[in-house]
Image (cartoon, rainbow, N blue to C red):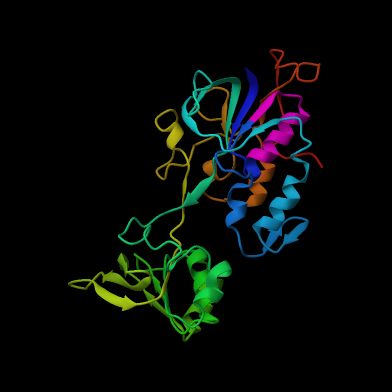
């Protein structure tokens, strides 16, 4: 029996674990991956909007975040696969056969890049399907590439790749790009970037590596093939909520709905970080917003809840 079990050890999960530790709660953090840090391991560009810190990439910021993890009093289990979760009963069953019980559960499972779901997408990962323009662009320098998406991330990557790539083709399914104007304005003036709106990428083609993509335009009778050597997909993210489906309310995109105290519709189950924040999924919000109604520990350290509750601040105290 634990006071709190936190599912996910990204910035939101770790920050909440330290907060629970400060409150004297018996806390266990479960992480599926070998390393903690979540999406920080996939951020290859500089991070310049985290208050008080500027880092070259997510890995560097992770190293700062993780300095105190080894000395923390909360328990942390990595490489832990969860078979099922009963939120009402606060019971978690692991694939190893072990059952865990707690008084409260905090969901901090984050998000993952949304996939197109087209032929060739999975087959050519690392063989032309690019994970990051910031990390991989030198590998594809001088080659033609295709980017799928119309938001900030897609346009930012198009501008970045256009600096050293002969042609960059941006494919977006609707008529108007969603990206901010300060990003779309330089896009229009770039001679290296071609934008196909009202178009969808239907297939990635190749044998050992990517050699072309298939694109269907709205007015086209059939798809046409475009020769490229790299494909970057930036069509947003989707929440990691498969474990909890149908146990509480989500929005139309699957993000967990919470109130202003980070409470879900299930009592004593909270959701924090990107998995419950589709509008502002930033590292800053993940590390500062905490469950605002937190069960308090008894007067003795590790003494359990003691049957009391109090309203904790929503941000970590300075």
- Residues 242 and 136: in front is 136
Outermost residue on the front side: it is 208
Q: Is residue 27 magenta?
A: yes
Q: Position of residue 82 (x, y in %)?
A: 50, 31
Q: Position of residue 167 (x, y in %)?
A: 44, 82
Classify the position of the N terminus by image quarter.
top right
Q: Is residue 49 above or below residue 189?
A: above
| Rendered residue at 41%/33% (across/down) | 245
Q: Position of residue 284 (x, y in %)?
A: 67, 50
* Image quadrant where residue 20 sits: top right
317 sits left or right of 269 in the view = right
Q: Is residue 92 above or below residue 196?
A: above
Classify the position of the C terminus by image quarter.
top right
Q: Is residue 250 above or below residue 173?
A: above
Does residue 313 appear in this view? no
| Rendered residue at 45%/80% (across/down) | 143
- Residues 86 and 184: in front is 86
244 sits left or right of 173 in the view = right
| Rendered residue at 53%/22% (across/down) | 98
Q: Is residue 304 magenta?
A: no
Q: Which residues are magenta?
A: 13-28
């Amino acid at each position: 029996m634990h006071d709190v079990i936190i599912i996910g050890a990204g910035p939101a999960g770790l920050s909440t674990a330290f907060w629970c530790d400060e409150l004297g709660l018996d806390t266990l953090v479960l992480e599926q991956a070998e390393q903690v840090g979540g999406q920080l391991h996939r951020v290859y560009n500089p991070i310049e909007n985290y208050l008080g810190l500027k880092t070259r990439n997510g890995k560097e910021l992770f190293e700062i975040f993780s300095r105190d993890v080894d000395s923390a009093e909360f328990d942390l289990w990595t490489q832990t696969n969860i078979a099922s979760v009963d939120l009402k009963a606060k019971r978690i069953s692991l694939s190893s056969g072990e059952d865990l019980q707690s008084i409260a559960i905090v969901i901090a499972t984050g998000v993952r890049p949304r996939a197109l779901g087209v032929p060739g997408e999975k087959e050519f990962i690392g063989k032309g399907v690019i994970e990051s323009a910031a990390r991989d662009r030198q590998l594809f320098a001088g080659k033609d590439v295709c980017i799928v998406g119309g938001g900030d991330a897609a346009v930012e990557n198009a501008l970045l790749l256009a600096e050293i790539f002969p042609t960059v083709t941006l494919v977006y399914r609707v008529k108007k790009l969603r990206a901010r104007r300060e990003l779309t304005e330089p896009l229009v003036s770039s001679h290296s970037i071609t934008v196909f709106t009202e178009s969808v990428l239907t297939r990635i083609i190749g044998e050992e590596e990517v050699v072309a993509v298939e694109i269907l335009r709205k007015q086209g009778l059939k798809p046409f093939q475009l020769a490229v050597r790299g494909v970057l997909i930036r069509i947003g993210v989707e929440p990691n909520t498969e474990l909890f489906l149908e146990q509480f309310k989500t929005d139309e995109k699957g993000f967990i709905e919470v109130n202003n105290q980070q409470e879900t519709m299930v009592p004593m189950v909270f959701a924090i970080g990107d998995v419950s924040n589709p509008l502002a999924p930033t590292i800053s919000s993940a590390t500062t917003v905490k469950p605002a109604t937190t069960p308090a520990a008894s007067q003795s350290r590790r003494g359990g809840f003691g049957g009391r509750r109090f309203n904790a601040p929503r941000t970590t105290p300075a």
